[in-house]
Each structure stands twice: as C-alpha cells, then as structure tokens.
Image (tube, rainbow, N blue to C red):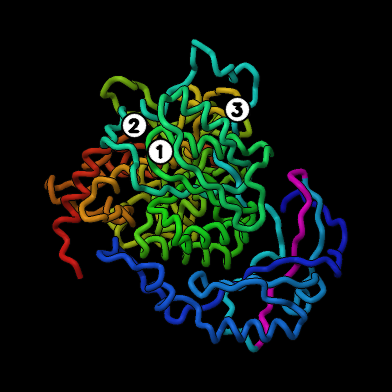
Amino acid sequence: MPGSKVLGQANLHGVIDVTLKLRRKQALPELEARPTNPLTRDELEAQYGASQDDINKVTQVMSGFGIKTVSSSAGARTIRLSGSVSAMETAFNVKLFNYSHVSGNYRGRVGYLFIPDELKDVVQGVFGLDNRRTLRRRRQPVRDTGARQALSSSTPKWYLPQQFGEHYHFPQGDGTGQTIGILEFGGGYFPNDLTRFCAKAEVTAPQVTAISTDGTSTESKDGAEGEVMLDIEVVAALCPRASIVVYFAAWTEQGMIGALDAAMQDKTNNPGVLSISWGAPEGTDIWSDQAMSQINETLKEAAYLGITVCVAAGDDGSSDGLADGHAHADFPSSSPYVLSVGGTTIVDLAGTNADVVWMEGDGLRADSGGSTGGAVSEVFQRPDWQSSITIRSVNPGAITGRCIPDVAANADWVASPYLLVVDNHAEPNGGTSAASPLWAALIALMNCQLDSGKRVGYLTPMLYQASGSVVGQTIGSVGCTDVVSGNNDTASVGGYSAGPGYDAVSGWGTPNGQALLDAINASLSSTVPA
C-alpha cells in the first residue's frame, strides 16, 4: 500500500487462512442479455461448479506442504486452506512481510504467486496471503456535532427514504416476500438504531439477519457503522415487510470474494437483489488481476441466477479519489454484470424538475466534498449492449471500455440528505452508498409485482434495449428521468458531463419507478421462453 513501511518478515509459525478459486467443469458462457430462464443454484453447481476430483487433488497436494483443507464448496469453486506462514511461502513460492500503515498494519506479499505444477490448470486464484485493505466505503458518515441531532429534534435536516420513493414514483408495495442482501466490510448492525429509525419513519421494523462470512464482527463500532445502518435503513423504510440479510466480511480481496460467494450460495435466504456500497478504483495496484477476474465471474453467476446486483459508482467524481491525474472507474461497479448506480441532487422534491448531477464543493471527500462516480472502464471492454454509446474515456490511449453508471438517484447529503440514525443520534447523510440501496429497494418492489414469481434479475442490458412501448426509445429512457445538468470533473485529465440521453455521470437518469416496471413487464411478456 502507498505510504507503508516494512516491519519485518511475517512470523513463520503464524497460522493463516487462504481461499483458492478453482476452474469450472465447463466455462460459464458469455452473457449479453438477461437470461430468459435463470439457473438454480443446483444447476449452476452441477454444470459450472468445480469438480470433486479437482477439490480432492488440491487437498492432496496441499497436504504435502502441511496445509489443511478447512472447507470446500463445489458451487462456489472454493477451497479454504489453513497452514503456517512457512508452509504457505513454500507452497506458493512467495515471501510474506508485515507492514505498517496509517490505516492499520497488514500482511503483504512480495513477488508473483506460483502454483504447484500439479495444480497449474486447476487453481485460478489465491486469496488471503496478503490482508491489505482494498475496499472502502462510499460516503463518510457525518461525525461533527453541528450536523448530528437528538432523535427528538423537531427541526429535522433530512428526508425520509419514502419521500424519495414518492419523488421517483416507486410502485406501491412493502416488499412482502422479498429478500434483499447487503454486503458490508466493516461496521455493524445495531437493532436499537433500526428501531429508532423505523419509529421516526413510521414503518414496522423489518426482519434483519446479520451473517459473518469469515469471522468478522457484525457489531463493530469502527466508524463504518454509519455506512451499514444507512444501507439497512434506506431499504427498511421502503420495504418494511422484506427480509434483509447483511453479509459481513473483512475489507480485503478475500473478504469481497467470500461475501459474494456467501450470497450466491445462500439457499436459505435466497436474496433476489444485492446492494454493495463499497469498492476501489480500477487502474491501480489496489486490485490484483486475479481478484477482479474472479469477482467478475461471481457477478456473472448472479446474472445467471436472476439476482440484481446494485453497486455504488463512487463518491469522488472522475478521479475516484486518486491523485494521479487520471480518471478511474470504480470496481466492482464497473463490472458488466452489475447495475452501476450514480448520484444526483434533488432540486425540486415536491415538483417535476429533474435532478442534477451530484457535486459538492470540489467533489472530493478528502476536502469535505463529494461527487458522483462515473467513467469508462480500463479493464472491461464495452459490452455489445452498450455498442450505441459513443462516450470515450478522457484518459489518453484508453480502451473503449464499459461505461458507468447505468442509472442514478439522490446522493446529496447537504441539499437533499437522507435521514440516518446511528449511535442513537440522527444525522443527514447520503452518497451513492445511499443511492444503491434505494435502487435495490425499487428492484424488490418491482419483483413483488412481476408475474409468476419472476425477478427483474440481470436488468442492466435491458436498459439499453429498445422499448416495446415507445418507438425510438430504450427501456432506460422510458423508465428513467433524464438528467441533463452537471459534471463529475475531479481529475486533472477531466471528467464527464450530463446531457440528453445516456451519459457517464447519471446513466439513463433517475428512476421513474412505475414507468420502469411497466416497461420491464412489457418486455418480459413479449419474450418467448427458450
């Protein structure tokens, strides 16, 4: 990590856990449209999971190094290993060191990873040798006493999510029968705060299940609890009868992979939509290539399973918080298999005026500002369903990559802030980390009204296809209100601006919930099952 210092070699006798990703029985086919008939988890495992022979082979080879298999999952294609630092260094021909950093000490590796010859075609990723922090939450929770208020305050400085739902014409409903998953990499869930929030929002508190996927605390007060409670409360206000499942993990590559796997394999709760308010920039050494590849593979699985994954696009404009002068898309928001959610400011909550692009101050959180993420990916090529989009990267010599965001919603924590109750206080908050669960709640409400138990599922490519109800328009333009004002210029090389139609700061715009539901229903009813 930039700014870190070597403390010394890692304790050779220390025991660490490592996650291996294995090859599939057969490659998961490319997916350029929403699958007509989503796969079940059993079908996904049977056709595209890891083979038991490969799992047995890895277990056997690793045991020769003194490394034990703790658990395995053919569906997730994972094996969890446990062994000493010395054994891991020998097995993967790597050196591990301890580092100090202002954000916390960590273990890192030096040099490339090597796979034992016997496993060279079997193992596709090794995660956990290093535990440096990669993910970061989108919006910093407010902590200044001037912004925080007692819960009994009679002069609120915020709006309730239901008011945004009304502004965006969300369809009627309370989320009955739906399960919404939320991925968190810090903080904790505190029922008392949710109870107090629901009392102020005048809704029944929903059922919330907190799951630690790797032993990470689900009740940590590490400064990220505001992020967790914001995600939960936005969903709770709009879908009080839904079940909310919060998957906690360490904020590392291994943590992200484990949390996503847990949600994909969760047959018990079976979430129909996920919301992720965490990420990190592309185009740097923050993410390893193997992590981006395997996370993207799992997100493809979500698309095949009919799970909509909403991901915040970032809160630092075109630079994504990096000072290297370049523009950066945020990952996993840049994956082609997710619904990337940008941020806007509501200028007319009770009226009909369109939102504008969210830009506070200089657009950077480090300067107490903030602005919507939005860029052109330097990792993922532009999907066929974005072939009509002509936006080019502002970075010289960049590829014609995937454009984000796909859609947007209110993110402004000053002009149109969300109510957040955390640590027994009320405060205004926002960011794309609020816009993402807002969209997740909308997806759940739409799932309630689709015919025959269908799910919206892999919505993203649908937004770019022609609408069957309005000639010359896409489903995105029919189901969203166009945002035509504002930009996210925070990088030296430049940024992106709003304009008529699709753009790289607001996507197709803010939701017109009922119109989007009608357009999706019309599209699904005209689709002939394969």
Residue depicted at x 77% and y 59%? 107
Question: Residue 400 location, x and y as percent?
Answer: 40, 58
Mark drawn on residue 438: 1
The amino acid type found where label 2 is placed reads: Gly
Distance Cα–Cα, label 1 vs label 3: 19 Å
The residue tagged with tag 3: helix, strand or loop? loop
In the displayed image of the protein, which residue is found farthest to the bottom? 118
Quarter of the view holding residue 88? bottom right
The amino acid type found where label 3 is placed reads: Val
Whichever of labels 1 and 2 marks the residue nearer the N terminus, that label is 2
Crowding at mark 3 (Cα within 10 Å: few <14, some 14-19, many 20+): some
Question: Residue 296 location, x and y as percent?
Answer: 48, 63
Whichever of labels 3 and 2 marks the residue nearer the N terminus, that label is 3
Residue 112 among magenta residues: yes
Examine the rendered structure and indicate whether residue 318 appears above or below residue 259: above
- In depth, the one of 412 and 256 nearer the eye is 256
Examine the rendered structure and indicate whether residue 496 appears above or below residue 39: above
Does 71 sit left or right of 508 as displayed?
right
Does 161 sit left or right of 468 as displayed?
right
Mark drawn on residue 165: 2
Which dot, 3 or 2, sits closer to the camera?
Answer: 2
- Callout 1–callout 2 Cβ contact below 8 Å: yes
Residue 322 among magenta residues: no
In the displayed image of the protein, which residue is found farthest to the top? 154
Distance Cα–Cα, label 3 vs label 2: 23 Å
Which region is colored magenta? Answer: 102-117
Whichever of labels 1 and 3 marks the residue nearer the N terminus, that label is 3
Examine the rendered structure and indicate whether residue 48 appears above or below residue 486: below
The amino acid type found where label 1 is placed reads: Leu
Residue that badge 3 annotates: 142
Which SS type dominates the magenta stretch?
loop
The residue tagged with tag 1: helix, strand or loop? helix
